[in-house]
Image: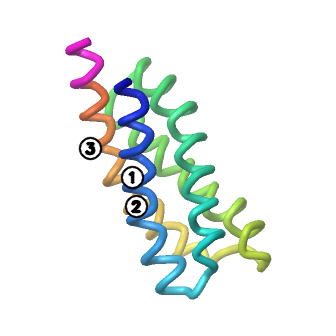
Amino acid sequence: MHYVKTVLLKAVIIAAVLLPILSLGYQYSFLATLLLTGVLTIVGFVAVDLFVLKMSSNWMATISDFGLAFLVVQVIGSFFYGEGMIAIGVSLVAATGIAIGEWFVHAYLNRTLAVN
């Protein structure tokens, strides 16, 4: 059950970062931003939270989330928005915001796993 809460928490944090930056700031489609949020949430949970976090530290998982967020926003975001590559600065800002939020998600997940 704590995995469901973690995935929902990740989705809320990622949406809270991406929606203001991409949809409000750069007028990208709201639906495309939600789809990007879903992709980033699922891929990040499986790749980083279930593997990297279990084998390393919160910091390593956060750095991994930063890299993943940057690549997903840059590559898949460009596909969703139907334009060329998204500006690198936009991807860096989004990845930084997501990484900050993910640090707290990892801390929550570590506490939850330690208790269970």
Q: What's the residue type where badge 2 is placed?
A: Thr
Q: Position of residue 21 (x, y in %)?
A: 46, 77
Tell me the quarter of the picture where residue 84 sits. Answer: bottom right
Q: Which residues are magenta?
A: 111-116
Q: Residue at x 41, y 28 (%)?
A: 3
N-terminal of the pair, mark 1 or mark 3, is 1
Q: Disc 3 designates what residue? A: 104
Q: Which mark is residue 99?
A: 1
> What's the distance in space between the residues labelled 2 and 1, CA to CA?
5 Å
Q: Is 38 drawn above or below residue 64 in the view shown?
A: below
Q: Residue at x 79, y 76 (%)?
A: 82
Q: Main secondary structure of the magenta part?
A: helix
Q: Is residue 32 left or right of residue 104?
A: right
Q: Is 18 drawn above or below residue 5 in the view shown?
A: below
Q: Are the residues at dot 2 and dot 3 in contact (C-beta closer than 8 Å)?
A: no
Q: Counting other residues with Cα less than 10 Å from the Cα at mark 3, is it few (<14), some (14-19), or many (20 or more)?
A: some
Element under label 3?
A: helix
Q: Is residue 115 left or right of residue 35?
A: left
Q: Residue at x 47, y 45 (%)?
A: 65
Q: Counting other residues with Cα less than 10 Å from the Cα at mark 2, is it few (<14), some (14-19), or many (20 or more)?
A: many
Tell me the quarter of the picture where residue 78 sits. Answer: bottom right
Q: Position of residue 90 (x, y in %)?
A: 52, 75
Q: Disc 2 designates what residue? A: 96
> What's the distance in space between the residues labelled 1 and 3, CA to CA?
9 Å
